[in-house]
Image (tube, rainbow, N blue to C red):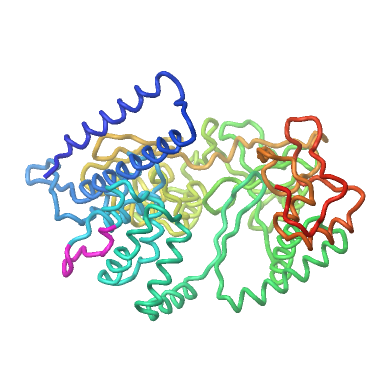
Amino acid sequence: MTTTDTVREAARAARALLSDALVGGSPTGSVDECAELLGELQALLDVAAAAQDEAIVALAAVECEWAEDGTVVQVRRARGHVALDAPAVVSGVLNVSAVHAERRVRDAVRRAADAPEGSLVCTGLGGLHGAMRAGRLDAYRAGVVAYELEEVPAEVAETVVSSLSDWFGREDGTHLRRRVRRLLASISPDLLRQRAVRAREASGLRRWVDEPGVDTWLGTFPSEEACRAWAAIDALAQQYVTDGVCERIDRARAKALTDLVTQQATIDLQVVLTTPADAPARPTGIASGAAGDLVPVGTARAGEPMLVQRDWLERAVAATTVTGRDRTGRPRLQPCDTATGAPLDPHGELSTSAYRPGARLVAFVRARDRHCRFPGCTVAARFCDLDHVRTWPLGPTAATNLACLCRRHHRLKQRPGWRAVLHPDASMTWTDPTGRTRTTHPPDQLHPITLTDTGTDPPPTPPGNPSLVLPDGPHSALEHHLEHRGPAEAARRVHITRPRVPMTCAPAPHDHAPRLPRRRDLTASPPF
């Protein structure tokens, strides 16, 4: 049985050796030598990932419990057992989100804790762990195969993994995924059909703030519903391009989608303005500025603030519903901590002597926290419990002692070895059984960073990354069509666009783009 100390010292020695080897600078050599070095380093990463899986399995099997004398003791369970707080400890060690940590623990246990057939932890995925330990399979591709075999019986999963063994060293994740599906279709077509039925039932739409000023939507829909919806979106988008409303078809489709949705519903906006808790004056509106300024706006959902145009926000403030205004007709104001920007209840007006908080206090805490207050957890506040950080009645039912916690982390907070403290500025400090300390903060609703419209914005650029320049570029439109559409199609398009061929890529750092000879057989093979 390998001890934890043995593996830890081996990891430290390997890290030190590799670090010392890089002291002299970057390695040099021929293409073959560099390729061989790259392969060896990848094999080292694969072995390290397998060792990390083993460490996670060992960590997850340990339960912290109260002893009779009131001390905390660690009890080791059977291999494959997952303690309730194991993902939380892993998230603190690896500095990853709570969701990622839970997925990491699950994947490690499924691969590395595979037991013989008939046992409770038999998954049939032990072959993936063996290939990783041999340096033939990386964690990403192993995860791709494991995902495809998520709900497959262990004996079928073992057969599929064994059949894929020869391909681990030479195929990427996409091709391995296709092979898994082909194998499943030949072994048990019903498994694929059941998966398709489950996927259709689990279809849905998610949204989050992505790039500054935009949201990202990710939706999965039954194919027949998606076909009809896409036809309606594309038809309206084509009309927008024809009418000049949008220049690009992808932007037109995005606008068509939001327009079709909002035309079918009535939306009432409620705007609440924030102000410092110690401010002598109470503002009545947003600060003045240019109509094109981008202003951050928080929402009741978890995530980063949205960036909206100032003129849209001013119209929303003017049209906000009555519930979002005070008795004088002004938009409702929310005092916030001067340093952290967290909403406060400075006079304790919402607190109560009862155990259960009132509706106004519940709404305040959810609006303040936005999501679960455990580090890295993004469960929305409306799905969370309101936890008394200090147990009631030792701690009051007040905003200074209530925090949003999802059900998992609510239970975890009560586990031996865990400690949470809610500070007056609404920051919350967590200490795990290993002694690691992390602090979470509610969204800052007082110190927005406004992106001012100075009139110097560059013209819009086509989608893509303008910083990426092909090493053998620039390429003309003719070269692009010869590569991607064939000589005949390229000849037809060149005849239309002559005598000037537009550039489709940023110029490379030389003076002139290479020119094709005047007389060239356009139906022949491309000259590159």
- Quadrant housing residue 107: bottom left
Question: What residue do we see at 11% from left, 45% from top?
Answer: 1
Magenta run includes residue 118? yes
Q: Nearer the viewer, residue 219 or 127?
A: 127
Work out whether residue 393 can be spotted. Answer: no
197 lies above or below 154: below
- Quadrant housing residue 321: bottom right
Q: From the top left corner, tell me how far across and down residue 384 is, in percent.
A: 41, 56
Report how many numbered discs are placed on residues in the image.
Answer: 0
* Residue that sits furthest to the bottom in the current view: 190
117 lies above or below 484: below
Magenta run includes residue 318? no
Q: From the top left corner, tell me how far across and down residue 170 is, in percent.
A: 41, 53
Work out whether residue 340 can be spotted. Answer: yes
Question: What residue do we see at 34% from left, 54% from top?
Answer: 355
Q: Is residue 150 left or right of residue 509?
A: left
Q: From the top left corner, tell me how far across and down residue 42 is, in percent.
A: 38, 41
Range of magenta residues: 116-127
Q: Nearer the viewer, residue 260 or 119?
A: 119
Q: Is residue 330 left or right of residue 518?
A: left
* Residue that sits furthest to the right in the current view: 499
Q: Nearer the viewer, residue 414 or 362?
A: 414
* Residue that sits furthest to the top in the current view: 24
Q: From the top left corner, tell me how far across and down residue 257 is, in percent.
A: 70, 65
12 lies above or below 290: above
Question: What residue do we see at 29% from left, 50% from top?
Answer: 412
Question: What residue do we see at 48% from left, 47% from top?
Answer: 369
**Main secondary structure along the magenta-highlighted residues:** loop
